[in-house]
Image (spheres, rainbow, N blue to C red):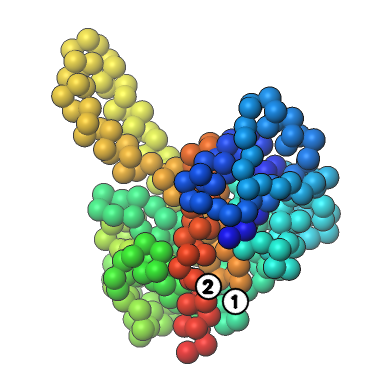
Amino acid sequence: MKILIDVMGGDNAPLEIIKGTMLAVDEFGIEEIVLLGDKSIIEKCVKENNIELKNTSVVHCSQVIENCDEARSVLKAKPDSSMAVGFKMLANGDGDAFVSAGNTGAITVGSTLIVKRIKGVKRPAIASVMPSGNKPFLLMDCGANAECKSEYLHQFGLLGSLYMENIMGVKNPRVALANNGSEETKGTPVVKEAYELMKNADYNFIGNIEGRQIPYGDADVVVADGFTGNLILKTYEGVAKVLMQGLKDAFYKNALSRLSYLGVRSGIDDMKRQFDYKEYGGAVMLGVKKPVVKAHGSADARCFKNGIKQAVWFLQTDLIDKIEKELSD
């Protein structure tokens, strides 16, 4: 197992990226890691923070794709960036998976145009495992395709179902279509067309799902276009942060409230763990030929480690081979 790491991408690069990568090596037994980035910066960071590199080599890259760069800069404007080099190595078989916390648009372009789609996949999608009041679910698309045709949404249901079954161990995953109402007649023309396709699909389609149902875990896969999915994702994360901050403020209001906190502390801690986005580390590009993981842009070491965990899961379960077989059948 050889995993390629974009050391220069993300708000906390390179330190948290390197620390998270070494945590992953220890926890998941990764045989080989390749760090991609400015070699002098990497070496300085490692030395200053007394980090021991294990099973690791460094490939020097002279450029960095910033969040402000255009998505297609990964192709021509910055061909020697850590992201562009990583995608080329992955496509050429010089690595088994690629993980980056960098520019989402560039990751989408690199995945689609350098690594390329699995045969039969109409559009790759960003799929993110999300917490709920019941159990984790998969939300896709989270931003790769702002506008979708009905057949794309139909296929997202299949890809998401295969992910949840093979990666998360969910039997016969429930697939739902994000909509502004549960009725079959609700939604835009594209969503209505997708509903007709999905209700005749081989996977377990359970109908439309409204936004208020999503946090309860009423579906294992929630399908949406990239515009809608990204809004759901960001709103979900924002509301979770507001609620947790509200709880903290309430319990720290005075001495009596601090005392009462002691009685419910274990329950609050359980809830924090349940809704902790760092547990899954980021999103995956479903539908491309090799595993590509988009780690959270603000990932710390633990969060990035869990992003690498997603790549490890992909490789251990041969999910891409299973997708290829399903589409060929």
Q: Which residue is mark 2?
A: 320
Q: Is residue 220 left or right of residue 34?
A: left
Residue beneath disc 1 = 118
In the image, what residue type sits under mark 2?
Ile
In this view, the residue in front, 124 or 81, is 81
* Numbered disc 1: secondary structure: loop
Categorize mark 2 by other alpha carbons within 10 Å: few (<14), some (14-19), many (20+): many
**Residue 220 place in picture, x, y as percent:** 33, 63
Please state which of residues 177 and 302 is positioned toward the viewer in this rendering.
302
- Seen at 42% across and 55% down, the residue is 129
Q: Quadrant of residue 213?
A: bottom left
User: Where's residue 133, x and y in %?
Assistant: 26, 49
Q: Position of residue 216 (x, y in %)?
A: 26, 53
Q: Is residue 159 visible?
A: yes
Q: Residue at x 18, y 28 (%)?
A: 264
- At x 29% / y 28%, what residue is drawn? 247
Question: Which one is closest to the eye, mark 1 or mark 2?
Answer: 2
Side of 44 relative to 290 (left or right):
right
**In the rendered structure, are the residues bearing label 1 and label 2 in contact, judged by CB atoms less than 8 Å apart?**
yes
Q: Count residues near mark 1 (Cα–Cα under 10 Å), then give few for <14, some for 14-19, many for 20+.
A: many
6 vs 93, nearest the viewer: 93
Among all residues in the image, which is located at the extreme top?
255
Numbered disc total: 2
Q: Quadrant of residue 204?
A: bottom left
**Cα–Cα gap, marks 1 and 2:** 8 Å
Q: Quadrant of residue 50?
A: top right
**293 or 252: nearer the viewer:** 293
Residue 235: x %, y % from top left: 43, 46
Q: Amino acid at mark 1?
A: Ile
Mark closer to the chain start, 1 or 2: 1
Q: Secondary structure at mark 2?
A: helix
